[in-house]
Amino acid sequence: MFQKILIANRGEIALRVLRACKELGIQTVVVHSTADADAMHVRLADESVCIGPPPSRDSYLNIHQIVAACEITGADAVHPGYGFLSENAKFADILAAHNITFIGPSGDHIRIMGDKIEAKRTAKRLGIPVVPGSDGAVTEEKEARRIAAEIGYPVIIKASAGGGGRGMKVALSEADLEIALQTARSEAGAAFGDDAVYIEKYLEKPRHIEVQVFGDGAGRGVHFGERDCSLQRRHQKVWEEAPSPALNAEERAHIGGVCAKAIADLGYSGAGTIEFLYENGEFYFIEMNTRLQVEHPVTEAITGIDLVHEQIRVASGGGLSVRQEDIKFNGHAIECRINAEDPRTFTPSPGTITHFHTPGGLGIRVDSGVYSGYKIPPYYDSLIGKLIVHGRNRVECMMRLRRALDEFVVDGIKTTLPLFRDLVGNADIANGDYDIHWLEKYLAKEE
């Protein structure tokens, strides 16, 4: 087991990893920018190192400074959390060169899954169902027209190196294709330094289903069930739940088994999430995230297994602590991402939290690194906390969530709490009857 882990992140995920380390008896080091000097994870860590000014490129994305912090403090492993350097293959390679363990997959696996075209090819080879579309990058309009005609309109054009909805454009007909192709390429080049794009069939009312997987790097793989992340705004997840209200037991077991086998065959090590669009009983691979997900607590709630403990165990060479038959699913869980944003316009709302009170009681968990008097900095992601609620079934979970949202108090800044109070009372949400476009349509009606 590791002696000392450096946590290369901030906010609630840094605090989440820190807690897991403390439970395992592992010393902790956190890095922080000058803007985060008063953050909760900095206060609670055994050691802290300031690695630069507020801009991420000068601090949390500064590989040289993070490696230096490891060497100064004697950390023998790094947990990257999510975001920042968590899916940076170069970072994983550099740590390995310095004999520091990256708590995640190999640089090679990060590279494969970070390139969406190569990821799709790999998924297909591993027996994972994929969305019909181009086999590689599309460079000419003539080729794009041919592929679109073969798979049928509407189609979606995506950046190969993309994420977060950037470099994604929908063409409803051949007349839309040229401008969609040009716009997607332009956005991809500006956002990622790579204008390669590919084409897929555009599914009109899909759900977003993701499967939590783990591999030991030596040919064993397991799945921890699926999560439904269909409530999204601009391709960003807002509300996640497990299990999905849309799947039956047979579908759940089938797609989980496919993903676990694929991870084993790939020789993958650590946590990963295989993401699908699901429509009319069919699953279509869209991407794999080679890290811990923001929404991992809902999986922990229904399995009772600490996924960060599992990450650390696997990275240290201890292998998986469970076999597939050991993983049991219990009840239903929902997570709401509470952001420092206007609940209608979604404009960021940095500032000082004058009062902060979290809900409690059976089945309630709040992952947050903020407190009364804490100043939300304007430099980073607006997530300030996650409310996770667990119940014996979805009905009980929704009732408990309604009560918890009423108890949650964040004063001094605007937050998205009012949005969730509206959603929990909506009939479509109560019935689990929604898709990836539902929330944006709902918000458009409210304007």
Image (cartoon, grey):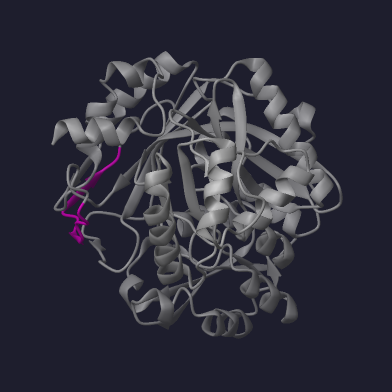
Residue 206 lies in the magenta-colored region: no
Determine the image quadrant of residue 32: bottom left
Residue 276 appears in the figure: no
At 41% across and 61% down in the image, what residue appears?
182
Image quadrant for the N terminus?
bottom right
Q: What stretch is highlighted in magenta?
A: 347-358
Q: Is residue 238 above or below residue 182?
A: above
Determine the image quadrant of residue 77: bottom right
Residue 351 lies in the magenta-colored region: yes
Q: Position of residue 307 (x, y in %)?
A: 62, 45
Q: In this view, does 77 lie above or below 199?
A: below
- Which residue is more in the foreground, 2 or 36? 36
- Which residue is more in the foreground, 305 or 342? 342
Q: In this view, does 435 lie above or below 202?
A: above
- Which residue is more in the foreground, 2 or 288? 288
Residue 312 appears in the figure: yes
Q: Position of residue 138 (x, y in %)?
A: 57, 58
At 77% across and 42% down in the image, what residue appears?
262
